[in-house]
Every structure is written in C-alpha cells, then in structure tokens.
Image (spheres, rainbow, N blue to C red):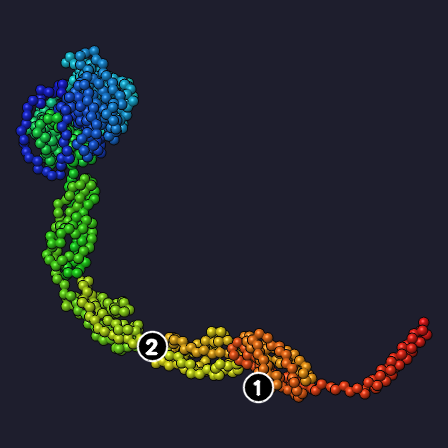
Amino acid sequence: MNSFKLSVLLVLFLGVCGVCAEETNAEVDILWNHTISGNAHSTDISDDGMYIVASDSEGSINLFHKDNSTPLWNYTADNGVNSVAISADGQYIAAGDYDGIVYLFHRDSNEPLWTYIIESSSAYNGVEAVDISADGEYITVGSWDNKVHLFDQAGNHLWSYDTLTDGTEFIFSWVLSVSISDDGEYITAGSMNSFVYLFDKDNNGIPTWKYNTSGSIISVDISADGEYIAAGSADDSLYLFDQTGNNLWSYAATDFVISVDISDDSEYIAAGSQDNTLYFFHRDSNQTLWTYTAPETIQSVSISENGDYILAGSIDDFVYLFEKESGEPFWFYDTENNVFSVSISADSSYIVAGNLDSNVFLFVHNDYPSAIIDSITPSPATYGDTISFSGSGSDTDGSIIGYEWNSSVDGFLSDQEDFSAILTVATHNISFRVQDDKGAWSNWSTMELIVNPNEIPTSSIDSISPSPARFDDVISFTGTGTDDDGSITEYEWKSSLDGSLSDHEDFDMSLSGGTHTISFRVMDNDGVWSEWDTTELVVTQNEAPVAVIDMISPSPSETGTFIYFSGTGSDDDGIISYRWISTIDGELSTDEDFSTDSLSSGNHNIIFRVQDTNGIWSDDAQEQLQIFALPVAIAGDNATVEVGESLQFFGQGEDEDGSIDNYEWDFNGDGIYDWSSNTASSATYIYDSEGIFTAILRVTDNDGYTATDTLTVTVDRAPVIEEESDSNLMIYLLVTGLVVAVGLAVVFTISRRKD
C-alpha cells in the first residue's frame, strides 16, 4: 500500500516535470487505464495481481479486476479517501477518509462490512494511512488524531495508541504511515513526533519499542514476517530496525525520505526521496546497491516479493521499473501527470500506478521468453523427405504455452514444439517463436533450410510367367525399380481383379480367373512413388465338368426289378467323384455305373452329377424313372351251376402302389368282356347251355396297368322226374318208416332197464 502524504507534503508537489525520456522497453505493456473522480491518492494490488484498488481526493473507492478497466464496484465517501489497502489474497479492502471514517469491504460488494468513525478532541481526525494483514484479519490505521489504531475483521476496535504522549515539537503528532506483518502479529507506525513504533497486536496498544529520530517519520514498512522495519524520515534519513528495536543502520539522503518498501523476504529495501533519488539496499548494509536520480521527487516505491524488481513513481509523471542488478530503469512510462502512488504484485507481473490527472494505470510486466531452433533434420533435404523440426523455449518469470513455426515459402507450419512435415522445393527461411503464460511472444529464431528437388523413381515389370495362365497355375512375378538420386525402398503390386498382391520385388502366387491388369510401382528413399507400370494377364477360369446319364434300364420298371444305371462325366481336369440321387430314395450311389432292385415305387427324379479334380461339381443331369407295382386280380373259386341258374361272381382286385379303377368279367372266356364296373367287382351271370367255361376277371389300376385271374364254371343239364316212379317211392318211404319205429322201441326198452 502506498499513499500520498497530502497533509504534510503538498507543498512539495507543485512542480511539474517534463518528459525526461521515451519509453524504450517493450517488456512492460499497458493493459488499461481508467479515469476516476479526483486525484489518485492511493493504489494497492493483491499479491497475484488479480485485484486492484484505488482511491481519490473526491472520496471514490474503486475495485478493479486486472482483465477489465471498468471497476467491479465503486463506493463514494463524503470526503477524500487518502489511503487504501487490499489483503494479499484480494478478499478484503480497507480504506480511510478525511472525515476519520475507517471502512472494510469484501471484494464481492461495495457495501462496507463495517465502518468506524475516529473521534478526536481536536478539529482533525482524518485517516492518513491504512494497512491490512495478508488474510484480512487485522487492519491498522494511522490518523490525524495522533493515534495508531488496530481493528479485527469483525470491526472490533482492539486498541489505539496516542503518540502525542511521547511529546513533539509540533502541535500535532499525526501518524503518517502504518504497516502490518502478513500474519497481523506486528504493526509498525511512524509519527510526526519523529518516533518509529513497533506493536505486538496482543499487547493492548503498548509499544514493544519506539525509536526517536530527528525528523517526522513520513513512511514505514515491515517485512512479511515482522522481523525487519524500514522507516523514512524528514531528517533526510532511512532507518532499518530489527524486531527487537535495534537500529541496524541508517542512511543519510539529501532530502526527505518519503517512501520506503521492504521485500517480503526482508532481503532488500527501496526508498524514494524528495532529493529525486531512488535508493536500493541490501538489508545487511547501509551501502547502496545502486541509486537512480530522476528529474523530480520519487514519490512512491514498491518492491516485488523477492526483491528482483523495484517500482518507482515520480512527480516527473513517470513510472520506472528496475531490476535489482541495475540502477538504470529497463522500462519507464509517461503518465502525463504527477505519479502519487505505485504498487507491484508479488511476482512483479502486474503494476498499478495513480496520478494527479485522476488516472489509474495497470501494466503487465513480463520478461519476454526466448526461443531456439534445436534441430532441423535432414538439412539440406530432398523433396519428399519427412523433415523433423525441434525447438524449445524458456521463460524466466513464467512458462511456455504456445509455439509457432513458419516458412518463408510455405507459410505457417505448426503450433507444436516438435513436428514433422514435407516442404516444397525451395530455400526456406524457417522461423520459430514461443509464447509465455502472459501472452508475450519471443523474438523469432531463424534457420535456413534448402529442399532440393527429388528425381522420381521408375518401375518396370520384368516378367510374369506363365502368361496366359490357368487359374490353378502358380504364377511368378518379377519387377525392378531404379532411382537416379537414391535407392528403392518399397514395392507394390496390385491386380484389377484381386486387389493388392505383394510388397516384394519378386513373388509367386495364383490368381483368380479373368483378365487382370497387373500394376507395379516402387518408392525411393525420399518417400516418392514412381508411376505405375502395367500389363495384362489372362488367367483361364476353371470350367465346370459336364454330367450325362447314358442309360437307365428298364424304364419304367416294376418293383423289385434290377435296374441298370450308367453315366459319364467330361472335364479338362478329370473327374474324381460321382453322385446318383433319387428324389424319393435319396443317395443311390457314388459309382459311375451301378444297378439296384431296391427302389421304392413311385415317380423318381434321378439326378446324376460329377466333380472335377478342382472340386467343382457339374450341373445336374436328370431323368424320370417310374417304379410301378402291377395290380392283382382274384376271380374266386371254381363253380358248378345248372343251365339257366343265376351264378354270382365275387371277384376282387388289389394294387400295392395305387387303387383299382376298373373291374371286367369275361364269363365264357371268348376274349370279350361281358361286364365292367369302376366301382364294383361282383357280377351275376346265367349260362344257357351246359359245358365247362373259363370265366376271366380283369382289373385295371390307376396307372393303367391290368391283371387277370380265371375260374372254371361247370354248367350241367337240369335232372328229369318220371310218373311210374311214384310207387317205388312209396315203398321206400314205408320201409324207412318201419326201420325208424323199430329203432325207437329198442331205445325205449333199454332205457327202462337202466331205471
């Protein structure tokens, strides 16, 4: 935190400095500037540079994010705000105004967490200086009521110390500067009464020690750990103390020392004086490491956490940035009005400054990264070569996040650290640069690369044998390639029908049947392929064999009859297998010729096929074969009948593989069928003459086959009865009756005796 000591030093800032030098270093760039309501009295920045606070003489308090010049929020007090401070983590903001009001804000709102009004018995109670611990837990205030105050984050006023009790040569003993250690344990203060104070926060406002100089203490600062205290005095001296109050050394300037800052590690101290000089020290000695004299007063100083960078603001309108190794600024910027307050982030990446022209400036400080081309291989290269590029970058205050490679011929090449590419034939100026995490690009690293033209290789098909070829031939392929400026490294053969064949110079294989366009090419050591060399190769396809059924005999055939089958096959390659198949009985034989008597009745589709030596089967040869069963006629038993009597014929018919469709009778065997029916087999016939006749039954089945059976019919003449025979009959009947009567009598007699 750095603030303008308005009340004491206003008279010192009436001069105006002209432009002393021009901005010369591009390592610091302005991010933005913002105009506030009044003179920018005080500025401060969080350790990481993310948040910036600024106050002005019109009472405006502004909180910014580094990425935007528009304030996150603004708060307006009733009177000028002389001092602001922000916690290291950027969470809390403390401020004090001319009316003696102390404010604490959280960064998320412009509504104060609390306010405290400093009461004074005198007419003066304004706040001259504020500071806040790293975590925002404690706030210390130096005010015009001659007191040092300590508050906690909740707004409790822990204690105050009245410096007027220590005496003064003035009527006032205003506390002009305060500073608090990072953990809030120690507070240092400087007063107009010439005293430097150190307090322990837990000691109820009783100084741990106090040191009396010979002039008002205008500025104090304490190291982060509270071990060292630096003080600038109106007696033109800079003082360094340890925590126990020992004055380790002092340095005599030639005018008021109005701004001091000590690095967080307490190794380095910077001081700005009204004698226009910036002084830089190591804490171990009061001998300056270097000094720099500006045209006007060095009004405000700030030092990075490790002391590597020192920032100064002057009423000559300039902001200066130094490295600890040199007393010459490596960067300066003309704000065009008196610079009252400056502050630098812990790692020196961000710089804030406020001037009398109501402007707040934010700069980004960045050590430019450096880039180097490590290798380009091969170099020189031949067209078609895959060229490997390797580069590296370094950044002293950050990291490398981006890369860029360009060619003067091919333009943009890559955004990778290492990559490979094929470039056009030309002399290339290769450029490489890197970008750091703050967005800054390095200077270009360059290297020349010559890419020579590449002679295209040639390919030749030397031989394909045999040509033409059969489908089962093993074909030999031979090719060669030549390259005038290198060697052949790869080969490629392909067929228009079978696709990729080989990646060897010579090879053997069989191809499918057809007319092939054979193509061959080679690649050289630069990765360039030749044109295709082509030729035609005819591969004769395998013709399917032909199957022929020579004979099936007899056909048709009755069930149980031996049938002979004979077939032949023809093929250029030879026949190795045969198959006979029935659509009813299935597989019949694997012989060329065979016979069988076991076929089922029915209409068979006989299939014959053959297979050649290449495993190809012929189309099917087919022939119909009917296996039939003849019907059976059953005429019945022989019969005898008299002439004129009706004779009943009971015939039957059977058919194994079908049905009887017709019955016929030839009653007298003259070959003429006298009766027929397709439903009945029985018939009646009357013979009108005696004799022996052959009756024939013929049946016809549903396939049209017939069968006959016969029986013999004997036809007799009917007997003749004469009249004189009646007496003989009577005698016969009488004799018969008598015999029957005698027999019955005998039986009766025997029966009674048994009783």
- Residue at x-position 50% and y-position 81%: 557
Name the element at disc 1. loop
Question: As displayed, is residue 229 above or below residue 443?
Answer: above
Q: Which quadrant of the figure has residue 521? A: bottom left
Closer-to-camera residue (226/336): 336
Rendered location of residue 753, percent (x, y): 95, 74
The answer to whether residue 481 is visible is no
Residue sitting nearer the eye, 219 or 90 = 90
Crowding at mark 2 (Cα within 10 Å: few <14, some 14-19, many 20+): some
Residue 16 place in picture, x, y as percent: 6, 25
- Image quarter (top left, top right, bottom left or bottom right) of the N terminus: top left
Percent across and percent down for residue 264 are: 22, 31
Q: Where residue 28 appears, x then y in whole percent? A: 13, 37
Q: Residue at image x 17%, y 57%?
A: 422
Kindly identify which residue carries mark 2: 543
- Residues at discs 2 and 1 in contact (Cβ within 8 Å): no
Residue appearing at x 61%, y 85% in the figure: 668
- Quick one: label 2 or label 1, which is nearer the N terminus? 2
Residue occupied by mark 1: 671
User: In which image quadrant can residue 309 be found?
Assistant: top left
